[in-house]
Amino acid sequence: MNRRQFLGSAAAPALAQTAGGSPRNVLLLIADDHSPIAGCYGNKVVRTPNLDRLAREGTLFRHAFCTTPSCAASRSVVLTGLQNHANGQFGHAHMPHDFTTHRTVESLPKLLRARGVATGVIGKLHVEPPEVYPWDFQSAGGKDGGTRDVWGMAEEARRFWREIGDKPFYLQVGFADPHRSHGGKQFANNRDYPKVERREYRPADVIVPDFLPDSPAVRAELAEYYQAIDRLDQGIGFFLEALEQSGRARDTLVIYMSDHGMPFPGAKGSPYDSGLHCPLIVRSPEQRQKGVSSDALVHWPDITPTVLDWTGAAGPSYPLHGKSLLPVLESATNTGRDEIYFSHTFHEINNYFPVRGIRTHKYKYSRILYPELEMPLPSDLYASPTWEDVVARRDPKMGRRRTSAVLHHTAEELYDVERDPAETTNLAGRPAMAETLATLREKVRAFRRETRDPWFKEAQGLT
């Protein structure tokens, strides 16, 4: 069934509606490699007025985490509500990696189409195969700069809204910013983009995170990263304006998030919070309490249940690994959301480093399945000036962490993330932590058993 046949079908089921009788819609904006670096997250250097506005009008989650710090695998979790070891998208979708989601998975776009919701994706998707992820409207991005042409992408959204008329919709926008470009050595700031104000940042002004060395090379790259975030924020503004002008904003749940953390060594591709901690802002037109800063622990398996809850679409024939965020949008406390689980296996095909773990507000436990392996950096990080500088200087430390600890991990790692947010001191071998370690270890074993982790085989001792 093609797009126009679907949108004009008289057999479409009853549509999801707001309390006022209008169709319920979703606009999901997903950045590429954006850590929670924005004004609303406390950074006073980078300019993010549109994200800041969204936070004032909705709910900002301070403790939001992806489950895998890799693009394709993380996006599959967003679109299926399943950990990536369960949905089959173990790593990158494009060649030569060629990982694909299991064809038995009932993805979010498939479930929404069954509800009569028009589904669209603009920009980066990065999951396969098409029969698992069917879309009524698909656009590669803007005409002048693709997935970094944020104005052009917003124009594509306007086209989507014109084509669907008054149908309820789910529109997903995949930005390329602030991902690296050109083999990892740039951030695509070497040109101008339509309607985007070019703002450069001084290396002296950036805030160096605690897991990176404070060096000229790092500061120069962070200044470039800030510029890409600035461009991304302008894109957010273009989409919010287009949504308002479409007349659909009063019926639309807006979600802003990132697939995983920043593209720097010790973050992207790593089991540290610096790779897993992400921005998440949700604005509901029905919430009365606005500008909420939530303490709840949430993760990306929660996105599919949230969208299904908002639209009234039925879930799949199997249990999901998350739960809807709608009940907690107006609460600043954790409201019983005190632990989340994460699971990473591949980035690229040669980036094999499987990790399973749990995070609470106080502790984080990681089970490194093959600790004899060196943790591989994603290829764009190997080529980055930051990593090249660390190697050239033979720097024994990257910020507060030992460089060797970034690459070499033990079978079990336990961190007190309240006292040690940089995750520098592994408590797993300390007698005083034996009970905590045993509790979290068993929780992760149960999580792997219940989610049918293919890497978990109790009979063979692969636990």
Image (cartoon, grey):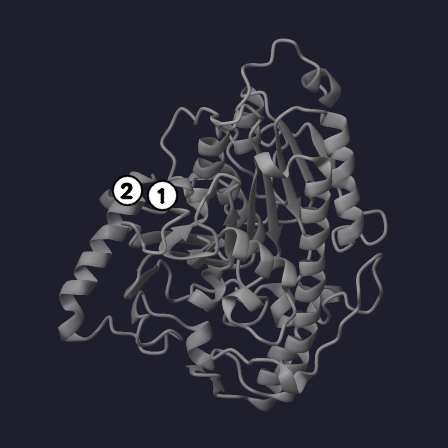
Q: For residue 147, say whether it is visible.
A: yes
Asked if residue 26 is positioned above or below residue 274 in the image, the reply reads: above
11 up-or-down from 110: above or below: above
Pointer 1: what residue?
A: 453
36 relative to 229 in the view: left or right = left
The front one of 396 and 325 is 325
| Residue 28 falls in image quadrant | top right
Q: Which labelled disc corresponds to residue 137?
A: none
Distance Cα–Cα, label 1 vs label 2: 6 Å
Please report contact status of discs 1 and 2: CB closer than 8 Å, yes or no. Answer: yes
Outermost residue to the top? 10
Residue at label 2? 449
Whole-percent x and y of residue 19? 48, 27
Q: Is residue 250 left or right of residue 366?
A: right
**Is 425 on the left-hand or right-hand side of 197?**
left
Residue at position x 17%, y 60% in the image: 438
Residue at x 37% of width, y 65% of height: 371
The residue type indicated by label 1 comes to Asp
Position in image of residue 305 (x %, y %)? 43, 36
